[in-house]
Each structure stands twice: as structure tokens, then as C-alpha cells.
Image (cartoon, rainbow, N blue to C red):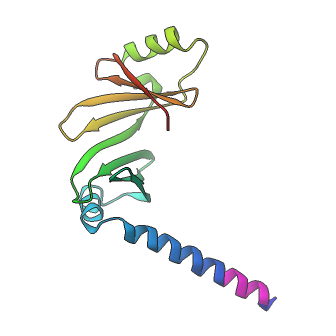
Amino acid sequence: MKRYLLLASVLLIGAFGFSQEKSKAVPAAAQAAFQKAYPGAAKVKWDKEKEDYEVNFTIGKKEMAAVYTAAGALKETEEEIAVSELPAGVTAYIKAHYSGATIKEAAKITKANGEVNYEAEVKKVDVIFDKDGKFLREQKD
């Protein structure tokens, strides 16, 4: 029994240490900018995205993400939305170009300059549209 408790303790300490290391890898300026913008955020998880830092989190029941530079400048935010909130052009495009497919997830992306795009996940591909629902590109994760 003592061996199991010791093993469990070692695993918990190792997991805690790993999560702390990952958090330390995020520049303080990016963390501070995020905490100032979203003080009530929960389920916060940081990831490196090329030269920037993406943070996934929830506000209330809404899933969100934000991308920050190392200096703490916000590049964009992504907010989960209902499929019914997508512009009509998005659903029309999906019906015409992805026969029989359904939109699994939808999001509203707001760039730092105020530009709005929409994202529709279809067949494990993110399809990106402008604010009016005009197709821009496909993006595979």
C-alpha cells in the first residue's frame, strides 16, 4: 500500500512540475495581458503557435481562445458560437462544396484590428470565411 501511495505522490508531483514548466515557458507579458483582459477565465491552457502563444479558456460556459505575441500584444480572439450564428453564405458554401457534410463546430474570429472572420469545422478541416460569409481558405490543423 505504501508503494502505491509513494508512486501516486511521485506521479502527481511530476505532473504538477510539468504543468508549471509549461506555464513558465509563456512570457510574463503574454500572461499578464491575458489575465488583465480575461480575469474570470477558467480551464486555462497555453500552447506555442509558431512564434506566438495561444491560450484556450472558458468564460462562463463559452469556449474561447486568444493569441498573444511574446510582448503581450493581442493578435486575435476566437469565440465559440452556435452554427445558426454563422452568416448565411457560410452554410450555403458548405452545402455546395462539402456534399452531405455537417458543420461540427463554429467560431467567430476577431483580429486585433477589428476584422471579423468565421470558422466552420467540416470533415476535420477548418473552413475560414470573411464577415459576410465569403470563402477565404481551408486550414488543416
State whether the magenta stretch is mostly helix, strand or loop. Answer: helix
Q: Toward which corner of the image does residue 47 lie, by quadrant? A: bottom left
Q: Residue furthest right?
A: 1
Residue 57 in the image: above or below residue 128? below
| Number of numbered discs | 0
Q: Residue furthest bottom?
A: 2
Q: Residue furthest top?
A: 96
Residue 113 in the image: above or below residue 88? below
User: Which residue is painted at 28% across and 23% down in the image?
Assistant: 131
Residue 32 in the image: above or below residue 116? below
On the image, the x and y values in percent for residue 128 come to 39, 26
Magenta region: which residues? 3-9
Q: Toward which corner of the image does residue 72 lie, by quadrant? A: bottom left
On the image, the x and y values in percent for residue 94 come to 49, 15
Q: Nearer the viewer, residue 141 or 5?
A: 141
User: Which residue is painted at 33% across and 53% down in the image?
Assistant: 51
Q: Quadrant of the N terminus?
A: bottom right
User: Which residue is painted at 39% across and 46% down in the image?
Assistant: 64
Q: Describe residue 88's horizontal placement relative to residue 5 as left or right.
A: left
Q: Residue furthest front?
A: 50
User: Which residue is painted at 59% across and 18% down in the image?
Assistant: 101
- Is 94 in the magenta? no
Q: Describe residue 31's horizontal placement relative to residue 60 as left or right.
A: left
On the image, the x and y values in percent for residue 18 come to 52, 72
- Is 7 in the magenta? yes
Q: Describe residue 97's horizontal placement relative to residue 5 as left or right.
A: left
Q: Describe residue 38's horizontal placement relative to residue 122 as left or right.
A: left
